[in-house]
Amino acid sequence: MTEEQTKSQQLLDRRINIVANGVGVFNTATVKKAKGAIITDVDGKEHIDFAGGIGVVNAGHCPEPVVKAIQEQAEKYLHTSFNVVTYEPYIQLCEELAEILPHGENTKAMLISTGAEAVENAIKIARQATKRPAVICFTEAYHGRTLMGMSLTSKVNYKFSSGPFAPEVYRIPFPNFYKYHGTQSREEFVETELNRLRESAHSMVDINSVAAIIVEPIQGEGGFNPIPQKYLEGLRTFCDEHGVLLILDEIQSGFCRTGHWASWQHFGVQPDISTYAKSMGSGLPIAAVLGRGEIMDAAQPGTIGGTYIGSPVCCAAALATIQLMKDENLNERAVYIGKLITERMENFRKGCPEIGDVRGLGAMIGIEFIEDNDPGKPHTELCARIVKGCAEDGLILISAGTFKNVLRILCPLVITDDQLYRALDILENQIRMHT
């Protein structure tokens, strides 16, 4: 072990000794400081960040206007609990969110701390608004690790020996075109899957008992699977026909990641309720639930929220983040980054049969690795080797997918072109080395 490696390894060893094993280790990089798209580890080595804190730093690490807003708010007051003492940053942020993410003529919002909390509260709101108990979700979905979040989450690895789970949760197949279309065209596949949805109202759960259907328009942990346009339109129609609320989970796909404030704006399909977190606060823990005013107001006073709903410091960070995103045109930047990455990886894919698919929206890109040119044979080991090799070469990446065979790219949108090209060079070199 070299001296330069020692500090990072020592920190990781200390982690093993004191931190519970159940806390995941997705990459073995360490950090002493971070700025923009660069993470500097405790040994002084710079890494290009393609993970973005799992999609949290779309506006980059430590953006100066956000840091300044945090400092200024911290000098005024840190906490009063919005339930007890009302403060303007909470209200101002809700007003800003309603402007950029409108849900009809009258939008209302609530703030909490995490994406899982947002999902929990969205389900409670939907149940109170409809007076119905059941919720429909999808395979390959990820909605958090709280009780309801785990119940809605598909991947077994996130919930080993954690049951019993919340009742009245029903799961149907996500319309994963790449993996399951067989010989069908996209149109045929979508119609087949919509028929499966309609059949569920007769064979799985009484549709008159269903409060909501919750779906990620672009699955995150599930492998960056975009929902087909016509399927989401059909899902909206199905919900309208049966009085079911449509909840869109935008926690990983929101705040400029796809080239819009939310991916549902890309699809042009209006949710009744939607959830946000991650890049909303540039790393500070803040999340939101937005919805049509009459739906949001159906929740009785005191039934949603908690002690730390919308920390004033986190609200200040979120307001500064949104303004920075506007000033830097990060929605446009995401489209540019996504186009560059997709074109380059699609060209590379032509000579690499292990890459089964390159997909995504905007700068939310997934690269799926398979064996024998078969989508049914995920190449988990190859993906893990590439992640490890990239880390050694100064590129931080993480995987996704039920079988961890999908590289997900969530680089900060403030990444420079030079940093982006260097990162892709590292990635392509590692793929060549291991295939």
Image: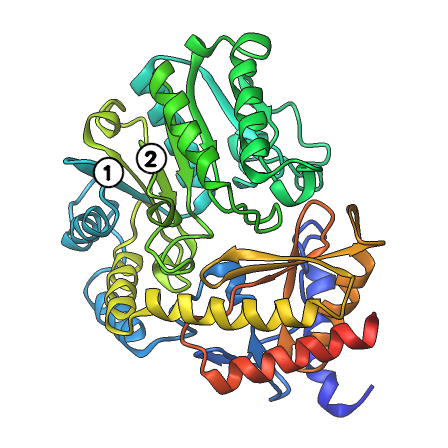
Mark 1 Cα within 10 Å, few/some/many (few <14, many 20+)? many
Question: Of residues 267 and 107, which is closer to you in this image?
Answer: 267
Where in the figure is residue 292, as x and y percent of width and height? Answer: 23, 32
Question: In terms of sequence position, does the residue under pointer 1 or pointer 2 come before the other?
Answer: 1
Residue 6 falls in image quadrant = bottom right
What residue lies at 64% left-to-right and 82% top-to-bottom? 425
Where in the figure is residue 424, as x and y percent of width and height? Answer: 61, 78
Task: Name the image colouring.
Answer: rainbow
On screen, residue 53 above or below 402? below
Q: Which label belongs to residue 271?
A: 2
What residue lies at 48% left-to-right and 77% top-to-bottom? 37
Where in the figure is residue 315, as x and y percent of width and height? Answer: 26, 57
Image quarter (top left, top right, bottom left or bottom right) of the N terminus: bottom right
Residue 45 falls in image quadrant = bottom right
Question: Of residues 132 and 377, which is closer to you in this image?
Answer: 377
Q: CA distance from mark 1 to mark 2?
A: 7 Å
Q: Which label belongs to residue 230?
A: none
Question: Of residues 279 and 41, which is closer to you in this image?
Answer: 279
Are circles 1 and 2 on residues that touch, CB within 8 Å?
yes
Q: Is residue 28 visible?
A: no
On screen, residue 48 above or below 122? below
Q: Residue furthest bottom?
A: 3
Q: What's the amino acid at mark 2?
A: Pro
Where in the figure is residue 184, as x and y percent of width and height? Answer: 65, 35
Query: Secondary structure beneath disc 1?
Result: loop
Image quarter (top left, top right, bottom left or bottom right) of the C terminus: bottom right
Query: Secondary structure beneath disc 2?
Result: loop
For mark 1, what is the residue? 103
Mark 2 Cα within 10 Å, few/some/many (few <14, many 20+)? many
